[in-house]
Amino acid sequence: MLWGPEPLLYRVLMSESPSAFRIVPKTGVIYVTSEATRLGFSQTHPDWCNLGQGQPETGELPGSPPRVHEIPIAVDDQEYAPVAGILELREAIASLYNGLYRKGMPSQYSAENVCISGGGRTALTRAAASLGQINLGHFLPDYTAYEELLDIFKAFTAIPIMLEGDRGYAFSHEDLRREINGRGLSAILLSNPCNPTGKHIAGEELAKWVSVARELDCSLLLDEFYSHYVYRVRPGVLPIESAARYVEDVERDPIVIFDGLTKNWRYPGWRVTWTLGPKKVIEAVTSAGSFLDGGGSKPLQRAAISLVSEEHVIAETNAIHRAFRDKRDRMLSRLERIGVRFDRVPDGTFYVWGNVGNLPAPLNDGMGLFRAALEQQVIVVPGEFFDVNPGKRRSGRVSRFKDYVRFSFGPSMTVLDRAIDRLETLSSSLASDNH
């Protein structure tokens, strides 16, 4: 059997490595994929079901715009792109946010409020490298890659903020005010909707968060990579949300937004993402990019311009909403029948955050289910990876999320059904054996 006692955190084993190099941890998704690859997994292997993937299905969806399969490359686009990105794409992104969220408002975004990066982690890394000697708040649970990001840069101190499952991971604007004042926070990093719980701060509550940030001069660093995957919307309303809607002054309000083609446009391989915020912030993250990564791909930035038109975004977002809402509902229903419990139905993302504590052993904790599922050629991500712990300051403790698993409904419905069929059979078999 593959399961068994495991340490809380997993690291790259660098036996006999040069002493100049430290041991670098893998993020949760990379770790589980690496473990599956040792057993024969590949992205094209027809027998594997990847419910651990952090990307959506990338093919045609009913009602979606035609997918891009070829990209012409001009001679000039063989050159380096500017570190901040090509002007035409920056202008198009500013126009998109103004059109979707800021019609009739006196303060508008311009190209100078946009910086292009070669991937979401790159955008976040540029921002982290630009922070000063401050207290930076972050939530538990949240995106696994935040852990190393919050540890590698020593200028700021990362302060964890615990969210509780029995409250549905709720956190109000009054809670926000209390944390900022009580912990002396100058910035807060969060994914919204949240990876992994699917909790979404939206509408009037999001407006109040922006208001508190403005009043207390606390920068909100908002990872909005799942902001087109929202399911609690009124009929006839575009299922999309951004803090950009509630910014009063784009230069003075301390709101910094990260987004890109990877999730909301379903082009993860393009690695075209952006940071949106006050010009001074954009100048800082661009300077950081000049020594961190040097800028993104110029041909792909050029090709992205047509994808960020309002017309394209509206059609793609509506197609995503229909397809992924159905997959969410199917996954919730089937996992619940197996015995998985949910602290909340996800408002957004393409993840289900499930408590597996009631399943038969060894499926009743995240790592046990992960190891057993690998034998069935199914990949999931144990919940403890989302217990973001920069600097390992909480070492030696059992994770609060050891009984949780993140299940992705990013793959097609066919893959979801096949994977859950296998988990159902596995659970039934173990339940019989235990009796």
Image (cartoon, rainbow, N blue to C red):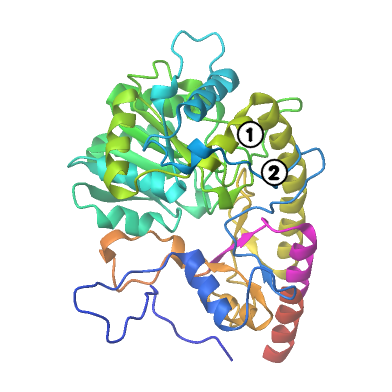
Which corner quadrant holds the C terminus?
bottom right
Magenta span: 404-421
Query: Residue 140, how many percent across, how many down?
Result: 41, 53
Within 10 Å of the Cα at label 1, are there few (<14), some (14-19), or many (20+) other Cα atoms?
many
> In the figure, is residue 93 to the left or right of 47?
left
Residue at the spot of label 2 = 68
Check if mark 1's residue and mark 2's residue have beta carbons within 8 Å: yes
Looking at numbered disc 2 in the image, what kind of residue is underneath it? Val
> In the figure, is residue 411 to the left or right of 280?
right
Within 10 Å of the Cα at label 2, are there few (<14), some (14-19), or many (20+) other Cα atoms?
few
392 is higher (above) or lower (below) than 347? below
Q: Earlier in the sequence, mark 1 or mark 2?
A: 2
The image quadrant that residue 228 belongs to is: top right
> In the figure, is residue 389 to the left or right of 143?
left
User: Does residue 418 belong to the magenta stretch?
Assistant: yes
The image quadrant that residue 87 belongs to is: top left
Disc number for residue 413 = none
Q: For numbered disc 1, what is the local secondary structure? A: helix
Q: For numbered disc 2, what is the local secondary structure? A: loop
Label count reads 2
Q: CA distance from mark 1 to mark 2?
A: 9 Å
Residue at the spot of label 1 = 307
Query: Residue 7, how many percent across, how many down?
Result: 39, 79
Looking at numbered disc 1 in the image, what kind of residue is underneath it? Leu
User: Does residue 354 belong to the magenta stretch?
Assistant: no
Which corner quadrant holds the N terminus?
bottom right
Q: Give the residue displayed 30% in from the left and 45% down from the top.
A: 128
Q: Give the residue displayed 35% in from the left and 22% down from the top.
A: 253
